[in-house]
Amino acid sequence: QVQLVESGGGLVQPGGSLRLSCSASGNMFAINAMGWYRQAPGKQRELGADIKSGGSTNYTDFVKGRFTISRDNAKNTVYLEMNSLKPEDTSVYYCNARRYLFGERYDYWGQGTQVTVSS
């Protein structure tokens, strides 16, 4: 099992910035990617950004150029730097760890952290 604990959410004004952190613990064997998803009320959970163990990153269009994902492998921690925040970025943000083993995918989730962008 993998345990994920997020921190760093909160209330911010439009145009502001926040930095989310996700600390992972437990069995990290074959965890080949970590990422950040978000889910607004009444909507499906969607990927924002992820980063593979080798360091390559992937961003969806609505965060590209505004958000930056990074990881500290020594600390098993992944970060999401969010800039130029918009009201539509308001969501619960979930940390995700992904394991591929013997052709099967296993997803692990944190409890989520609320990000509210409002004046």
Image: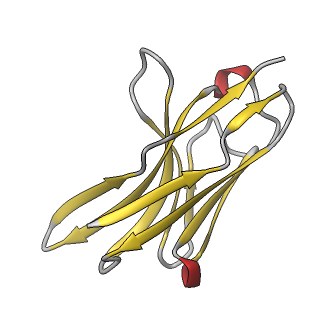
Residue in front for this viewpoint, 14 or 57:
14
Which color scheme did the rendering employ for the protein? secondary structure
| Residue 8 sits above or below residue 74 on the image | above
Q: In this view, does 91 lie to the left or right of 66?
A: left
- Residue 82 visible to the viewer: no
Residue in front for this viewpoint, 103 or 107:
107
Count every numbered label the image shows and give the total: 0
Residue at 32% from the left image edge and 56% from the top image edge: 108
| Residue 47 sits above or below residue 15 on the image | below
| Residue 76 sits above or below residue 86 on the image | below
| Residue 48 sits above or below residue 58 on the image | above
Residue at 56% from the left image edge and 74% from the top image edge: 55
- Residue 51 visible to the viewer: yes
Rendering coords of residue 100 (x, y %): 25, 69
Q: Residue furthest bottom?
A: 74
Rendering coords of residue 93 (x, y %): 53, 40
Q: In this view, does 20 lie to the left or right of 3?
A: right
Residue at 47% from the left image edge and 17% from the top image edge: 41
* Quarter of the figure that contains the N terminus: bottom left
Residue at 35% from the left image edge and 72% from the top image edge: 31
Q: Quadrant of residue 72?
A: bottom right
* Quarter of the figure that contains the C terminus: top right
Q: Quadrant of residue 30?
A: bottom left
Rendering coords of residue 20 (x, y %): 65, 51
Residue in front for this viewpoint, 93 or 101:
93
